[in-house]
């Protein structure tokens, strides 16, 4: 019998953070430091590219999977932008993220803190915040 | 918005719909809305101009392809405790071998242009004369073939890795490389169509400049398609060795891949030693032998009853 995904669980400790997750946290903390407390997915991809001097933006799947996991771990939190604001800009609504205190701690430690997590206790991953 | 841009965004939306299919409505809409927002912001952020817009389309496709493995893993995580699929692996492998034939022909069919200096302007006029439906349909088929090659790589790896991990990995790697090259060639081809239309609409020095740029793109497309075909062939050789070694197909069938390799080596030696140019015959014979193997081996695996039919089980456990 083939256990398709189990090898990932063996290789990766639950408290470990991947480089992309650390990059997101570092960029989010830096953005907050200069007064931008909230960010959206594409802005984060651009920020990571600029910070790392990379030529390419992070892949969609890589970025949003990492954001999803960070949210489940309580290291960032998210909300959907007010539809009125998006309508004023004539664009789709943004999902806005903000780094939490636990997220800042995780960045400093390079791993997920042992303290109880906001939403990380769930065994089955849920989609996060539902769109209003 | 340019055709290249529209197609890149369209493929991204199509892929997002694919991997979110079957999830709860909230989860599905959340991911789709987020990707929609990302595409909009990315498009608005991209520089203007024909070449820049084509580069933007390539950038979107690149982000899509590089994120695909994470999308698949994300889907498994969302799925919950477990997903089980029980399919005889011979059937999967046989179907995929036959699919490879179609994918190979579609991929190889991208570069059908005479790229010689003389008469290239007529090639551009011929291309610009095609209606947009035909252009879009061609682009869609080629993009699907690129994604199909990547999907076939995953299928072969899952179906055959227990039988031969090294050969299955080589075969899968070859197909992923071919898929990425095919996607790149398809995207470049869309940019090529845009340039052909600009060539017809312009005149004088600008027209000549567009002609030179378009020829450069056409040559890159040819090279990319050639690379994709070589990667498919390499993958086919790995699969041929694996299927014969594991006695999945009759041993005598190995003669076809051996013949294919011999033709390519013989052609190379002839060219180096005698300076002769037999590239067309060599290419057709070598590829033809391999295509024949794919058809026979694929049909054998797909239609021959097997008493030792081991099911492939994909069991995903959410962490």
Image: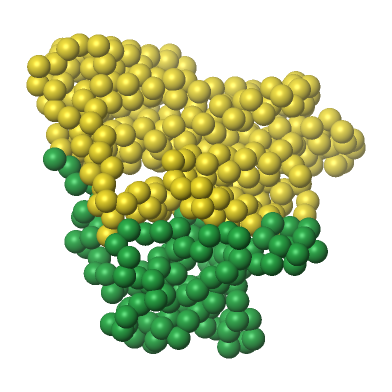
Chain colours: A green, B yellow
Q: In the drawing, does residue B289 fall left or right of residue B33?
A: left
Question: At x 75% / y 64%, what residue is drawn?
Answer: A84
Q: Quadrant of the C terminus of chain A?
A: bottom right
Looking at the image, residue B53 sits to the left or right of residue B269; the answer is: right
Q: Residue at x 32, y 80 (%)?
A: A116
Query: Residue B189 at what x, y percent from top left?
Result: 63, 34
State the residue in front, B262 or A32.
Answer: A32
The image quarter containing residue B163 is top left
Is there any visible trace of residue A106 in the rendered image?
Answer: yes
Q: Residue furthest right?
A: B204
Q: Is residue A68 above or below residue B157?
A: below
Q: Decide if residue B261 is in sight here.
A: no
Rendered location of residue B144, percent (x, y): 51, 31
Name the quadrant of the N terminus of chain A. Answer: top left
Task: Tell me which residue sits at (46%, 48%) in the image.
Answer: B24
Camera-side residue of B213 and A119: A119
Q: Quadrant of residue B94?
A: top left
Q: Where B237 sits versus B220, above or below?
A: above
Q: What count of labels does the image hold? A: 0
Question: Is residue B173 positioned above or below B148 on the image?
Answer: below
């Amino acid at each position: 019998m083939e256990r398709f995904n189990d090898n990932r669980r063996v290789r990766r400790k639950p408290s470990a953070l991947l480089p992309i997750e650390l990059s997101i946290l570092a960029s989010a903390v830096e953005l907050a430091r200069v007064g931008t407390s909230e960010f959206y997915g594409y802005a984060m991809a651009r920020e990571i590219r600029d910070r790392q001097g990379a030529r390419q933006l992070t892949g969609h799947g890589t970025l949003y999977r990492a954001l999803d996991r960070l949210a489940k771990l309580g290291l960032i939190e998210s909300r959907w932008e007010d539809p009125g604001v998006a309508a004023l800009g004539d664009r789709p609504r943004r999902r806005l993220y903000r780094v939490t205190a636990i997220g800042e701690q995780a960045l400093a430690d390079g791993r997920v803190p042992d303290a109880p997590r906001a939403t990380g206790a769930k065994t089955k991953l849920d989609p996060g915040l539902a769109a209003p | 918005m340019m055709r290249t841009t529209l197609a890149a965004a369209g493929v991204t939306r199509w892929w997002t719909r694919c991997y979110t299919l079957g999830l709860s409505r909230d989860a599905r809409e959340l991911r789709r809305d987020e990707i929609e927002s990302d595409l909009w912001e990315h498009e608005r952020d991209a520089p203007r101009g024909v070449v820049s817009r084509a580069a933007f389309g390539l950038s979107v496709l690149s982000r899509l392809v590089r994120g695909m493995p994470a999308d698949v893993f994300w889907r498994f995580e969302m799925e919950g405790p477990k997903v089980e699929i029980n399919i005889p692996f011979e059937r999967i492998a046989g179907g995929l071998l036959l699919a490879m034939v179609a994918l190979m022909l579609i991929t190889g069919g991208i570069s059908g242009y005479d790229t010689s200096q003389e008469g290239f302007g007529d090639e551009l006029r011929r291309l610009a004369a095609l209606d947009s439906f035909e252009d879009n349909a061609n682009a869609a088929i080629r993009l699907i073939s690129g994604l199909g090659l990547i999907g076939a790589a995953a299928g072969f790896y899952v179906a055959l890795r227990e039988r031969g991990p090294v050969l299955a990995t080589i075969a899968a790697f070859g197909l992923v490389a071919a898929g990425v090259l095919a996607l790149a060639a398809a995207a470049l081809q869309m940019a090529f169509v845009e340039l052909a239309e600009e060539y017809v609409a312009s005149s004088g020095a600008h027209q000549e400049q567009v002609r030179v740029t378009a020829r450069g793109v056409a040559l890159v497309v040819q090279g990319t398609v050639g690379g994709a075909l070589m990667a498919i062939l390499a993958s086919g050789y790995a699969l041929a060795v694996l299927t014969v070694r594991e006695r999945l197909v009759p041993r005598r069938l190995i003669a076809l891949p051996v013949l294919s390799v011999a033709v390519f080596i013989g052609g190379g030696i002839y060219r180096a030693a005698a300076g002769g140019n037999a590239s067309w015959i060599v290419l057709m014979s070598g590829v033809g032998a391999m295509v024949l193997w794919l058809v026979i081996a694929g049909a054998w695996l797909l239609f021959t009853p097997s008493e030792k039919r081991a099911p492939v089980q994909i069991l995903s456990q959410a962490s």
